[in-house]
Amino acid sequence: MKSRLLLLVLAVLAVPSSAQLSPKESFVVTEKEAFGLMPASLVAAPTVRQLEWSPDGQYVLAVRESLRLKSEDVRKLMQGARNQPPPGELQLIVWSARTQTSQIAWKADMGAAIEVIYWIPKSDVAFVIARQLVRRDPTKPPEHHRYLVRVSLSNATVREIADLTEMPWVLVYPSPSQPIAVVHKRSEVPPDGAARQGRSIDEVYVLRPNSALGTAISLPDQSEVAPGKQFRLTRIQWSRDGFTVYLGDVDREATIAYNKANAQKKTFWRWLSLNPSTGRIQPASDPMLWEPSPPEGPIELTKTVATAGEGAKKQIPLLWLQAKEKSAFPRALVASGASRGSLSPGTDGILYDMQGAAWVTPILRIERSLFDTALLAAQKMEAMSNAKQLGLAAIMRAQDYDETLEGPDGINDKLMPYLQSDLFNGFTWTYPGGPMSGIAKPAETELGYVTGPGGRAVIYADGHVTWRND
């Protein structure tokens, strides 16, 4: 397994060399690991509006606008037809890290929108709230249709779960670690009879990856929570283990009393615990709430700005992969012109937007010791390759100059016209010069060498190269 990985690292290290990049420009190295940038994969062509990783980093969801404007469409817009959406499609695209391919899961006209994306952990399912114009009655203008959609990431298909057109307040709260979510729906009831104000009705639903929206879970009578106090659901949070939902309301009396007596402000809560499996709700005190943890790991994404052009200089954003600790290989350029970027949850890919298109650059993550071994091997291969090209350049020049090999004086300038690039780093020419016919044993006559790790690549008069350890 390690031998195969070593070959892969060698291949990656060889690519930058041919593109005039050093390993320092394509790898970030920390104390224990090395992170190499692989060729980028296109997620979605322009113009991308939203981009998100799945919690496990196996998928990306991208919202893309695909305009199809013609000259007559532009003319109509200029003439005042601005209430009509421009021709084209809004697409929801699923990209798979396993296959490195994208599929269109959902599409609608340009009047549609994806309001929010909810990921369900430990599953290949996401839920989105979508909105689009639908003409239900041909005699009337189109109306907004708002609905909750289940997205199957493995096969890029969608299914409508619930019509939300008459539900202006709907929020989804996925568990941080379990394949389940709760949905909070709030309905406003207008005042009736002697009531001066209307009231709100809160309902909670359990949402699982492979099922429709279940029946509403009724909140308990107010007296069961706090006698004489109205309970209004204003906060929903999951427990640290992701199995229990806590429903919260501000304890206004306790909060006001505390803040009057103390300079440091504090909010007090009344809590209910909900077991999603049984639907049971009961009062809770001092719940252990889940809090998102800051990103961890030895690397991070950073941004800088480069200036290009003359006169009115252009600012170009640069996206870097960078080590958090001091390193001989501290950073590698991911992309120039990237407006945003994010690391995958497993630190094995970088998602970014460049000139309206979405890309993922995979990260090759290996042990530091394996990288060091591969780097030495790659440097040796590079020295051997450079020596071979320099030897052939010297022989070609000799053929152009009466079959005479040059001496050390000015050798670099003389060989440069016969090379595609500068290969003189570590190069030393030792042959004193003279006609090639005077060399009795070309396969044993040294012309020069290129230094490498722990040795040198020796050039012979017949053009072959051998490695000699120091």
Image (cartoon, rainbow, N blue to C red):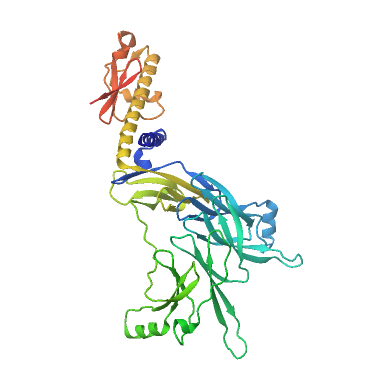
Is residue 82 visible in the rendered structure shown here?
A: no
**Quadrant of the rendering where the N terminus is positioned:** top left
Which of the two residues, 236 or 376, is positioned nearer the viewer here?
A: 236
Q: Is residue 361 above or below residue 443?
A: below
Q: Position of residue 38 (x, y in %)?
A: 43, 41
Q: Is residue 361 above or below residue 251?
A: above
**Quadrant of the rendering where the C terminus is positioned:** top left
Q: Position of residue 202 (x, y in %)?
A: 54, 76
Which of the two residues, 32 or 336, is positioned nearer the viewer here?
A: 32
Q: Position of residue 157 (x, y in %)?
A: 59, 53
| Residue lying at 45% horizontally and 86% vertically, measured from the top left | 227
Q: Position of residue 307 (x, y in %)?
A: 41, 49
Total marks placed: 0
440 with respect to 171 (left or right): left
Is residue 415 visible in the rendered structure shown here?
A: yes
| Residue lying at 55% horizontally and 79% vertically, measured from the top left | 200
Which of the two residues, 138 or 234, is positioned nearer the viewer here?
A: 234
Q: Residue reaching furthest left? A: 470
264 with respect to 191 (left or right): left
| Quarter holding residue 418 | top left
| Residue lying at 32% horizontally and 46% vertically, measured from the top left | 330
| Quarter holding residue 199 | bottom right
Q: Residue reaching furthest right? A: 139
Q: Residue reaching furthest front? A: 278
Q: Is residue 416 above or below residue 202?
A: above
